[in-house]
Image (cartoon, helix red, strand yellow):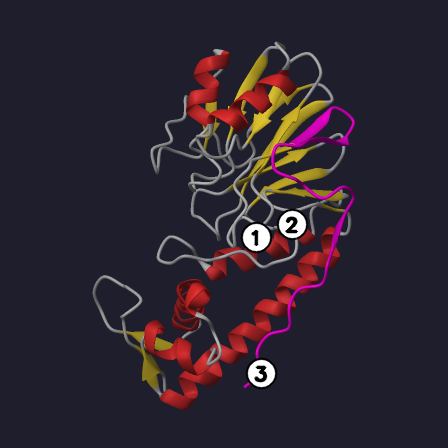
C-alpha cells in the first residue's frame, strides 16, 4: 500500500497574506483574513468584486479586524449582495454582520451553522450586473450546501472550498460526499466555455483549472485505492480502526482529519457496492465490511 503523492503546486501570482488586499483581476480584490492554520492555509480569502455596485464573496470568520479591512476596500460603494460559498466557520460567520453594516442582503444555499440568508441561491441563479455578473453553480461534495460563483466576463470561478491551492480539501461525513465531490470536479473540467482561472477560498489564483482538477482526481484515486486495500486486508473495521493501517505514521494533529477522509472513502465504497456498513446513524466508529465478490 502506497501513500498518495502530494498535489503539485498550481497557484500563481501574489501569495495571500492575512490582512492584505490584492487585485487579482480587473476590479476583483482578494482580502485575506488573519486566520491561518493547518486547515485554512494562509487564511480565508474574501473577495470584493465590481466598480459601481459590488458583490462580496465569503466574508470569512466573524472577525472585526477583517470586517474593517473589507469595509476599507468597499470604500462606501453600494453592495448589491454579500454571498457565501458554504456555511463552514471560516467562510460564513462574517456574512450577516457585514451585510447588516452595509444594509445589503445576504445570499447562500440555505440557513445552516448560524448563517441566515435573505436570498436563497441555487444552480443557475444569477447575481451581479453587467461585467460583474455571476452564475451560481451548486457544487456539493465538501459540503452539501456548497456553491461556486462563475464570473462570466473572466471565466473565473470562485471555488470556496471545492478547490483550494496546494492541498486537497477535507471531506467531513456525513454531510460531505466523495461521490458528489468527484462528480462536480469532473463537471467543472468540462464547462463551456472553459474556465480560465480559479479564485479559491484558500491560496493563490489557479490559472490551469484542468491541470489542478486532473491532479486532484489522480490524488483521490490513489487515496481510494489505499483505503480499498486497507479494507481488503482487514475485511472489516471502523474509520477510527482503519486509519492506523492506512496512515501508520500519522501524527496526532492530523489523525482526525485523516480519519474523516478515510470515512468518506469508505462511504464511497458502499455506494459503489464494494462494502457495506452497519445500520443506524453513522459515526467514525461505524463498522464497514468488505463485500465478497
1 vs 3, front mark = 3
- Return the x and y of residue 194 as percentages of the image width and height: 75, 45
Find out whether the residues at labels 1 and 3 contact each other: C-beta distance under 8 Å: no
Q: Position of residue 29 (x, y in %)?
A: 69, 28
Q: Going 65% across and 50% down the picture, which residue do you hit?
A: 188
The label shown at residue 188 is: 2
Q: Is residue 3 magenta?
A: yes
Q: Is residue 119 visible?
A: no
Q: How crowded is mark 1: few (under 14 residues within 10 Å), some or many (20 or more)?
A: some
Q: Which of marks 3 and 2 is nearer the N terminus?
A: 3
Quadrant housing the C terminus:
bottom left
> Residue 184 got which mark?
1
Q: Where is residue 115 in the image (x, y as percent from the top left)?
A: 38, 31
Number of numbered discs visible in the structure rendering: 3
Kindly check if marks 2 and 1 are in contact, taking CB atoms under 8 A apart as contact. Answer: yes
Task: Say what secondary structure mark 3 lies in.
Answer: loop
Residue drawn where x is 45% and y is 69% of the image: 265
Q: Quadrant of residue 52?
A: top right
Along the viewing direction, whichever of 198 and 249 lies nearer the viewer: 249
Residue 251's disc number = none
CA gap, disc 2 and disc 1: 6 Å
Q: Where is residue 60 in the image (x, y as percent from the top left)?
A: 50, 34
Query: Is residue 288 within the magenta segment?
Result: no
Q: Can residue 93 be seen in this view?
A: yes
Residues rendered magenta in the picture: 1-30
Residue at disc 2, secondary structure = helix
Label the magenta part by its dominant secondary structure.
Answer: loop
Mark 1 or mark 3, earlier in chain: 3
Return the residue at label 3.
2
Placement of 262 over or under 90, stated as above or below: below
Q: Residue visible at 48% across and 85% down?
A: 229
In the picture, measured across the screen, residue 184 lies left or right of residue 177, that is: right
Amino acid at each position: 500500500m502506497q501513500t498518495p503523492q502530494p498535489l503539485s503546486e498550481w497557484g500563481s501570482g501574489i501569495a495571500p497574506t492575512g490582512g492584505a488586499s490584492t487585485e487579482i483581476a480587473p476590479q476583483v480584490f482578494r482580502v485575506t483574513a488573519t486566520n491561518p492554520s493547518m486547515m485554512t492555509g494562509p487564511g480565508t480569502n474574501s473577495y470584493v468584486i465590481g466598480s459601481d455596485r459590488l458583490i462580496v464573496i465569503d466574508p470569512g470568520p466573524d472577525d472585526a479586524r477583517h470586517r474593517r479591512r473589507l469595509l476599507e476596500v468597499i470604500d462606501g460603494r453600494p453592495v448589491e449582495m454579500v454571498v457565501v460559498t458554504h456555511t463552514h466557520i471560516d467562510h460564513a460567520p462574517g456574512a450577516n454582520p457585514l451585510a447588516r453594516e452595509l444594509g445589503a442582503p445576504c445570499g447562500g444555499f440555505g440557513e445552516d451553522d448560524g448563517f441566515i440568508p435573505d436570498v436563497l441561491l441555487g444552480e443557475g441563479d444569477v447575481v451581479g450586473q453587467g461585467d460583474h455578473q455571476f452564475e451560481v453553480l451548486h457544487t456539493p461534495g465538501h459540503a452539501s450546501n456548497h456553491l461556486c460563483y462563475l464570473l462570466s466576463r473572466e471565466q473565473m470561478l470562485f471555488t470556496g472550498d471545492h478547490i483550494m491551492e496546494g492541498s486537497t480539501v477535507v471531506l467531513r461525513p456525513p454531510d460531505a460526499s466523495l461521490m458528489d465531490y468527484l462528480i462536480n470536479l469532473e463537471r467543472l473540467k468540462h464547462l463551456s466555455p472553459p474556465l480560465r482561472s480559479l479564485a479559491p477560498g484558500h491560496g493563490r489564483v489557479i490559472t490551469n483549472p484542468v491541470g489542478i482538477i486532473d491532479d486532484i482526481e489522480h490524488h483521490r484515486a490513489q487515496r481510494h485505492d489505499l483505503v480499498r486495500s486497507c479494507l481488503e486486508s482487514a475485511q472489516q473495521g471502523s474509520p477510527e480502526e482503519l486509519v492506523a493501517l492506512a496512515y501508520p505514521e500519522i501524527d496526532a494533529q492530523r489523525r482526525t482529519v485523516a480519519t474523516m477522509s478515510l470515512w468518506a472513502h469508505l462511504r464511497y465504497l458502499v455506494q459503489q457496492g464494494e462494502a457495506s456498513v452497519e445500520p443506524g446513524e453513522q459515526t467514525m466508529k461505524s463498522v464497514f465490511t468488505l463485500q465478497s465478490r
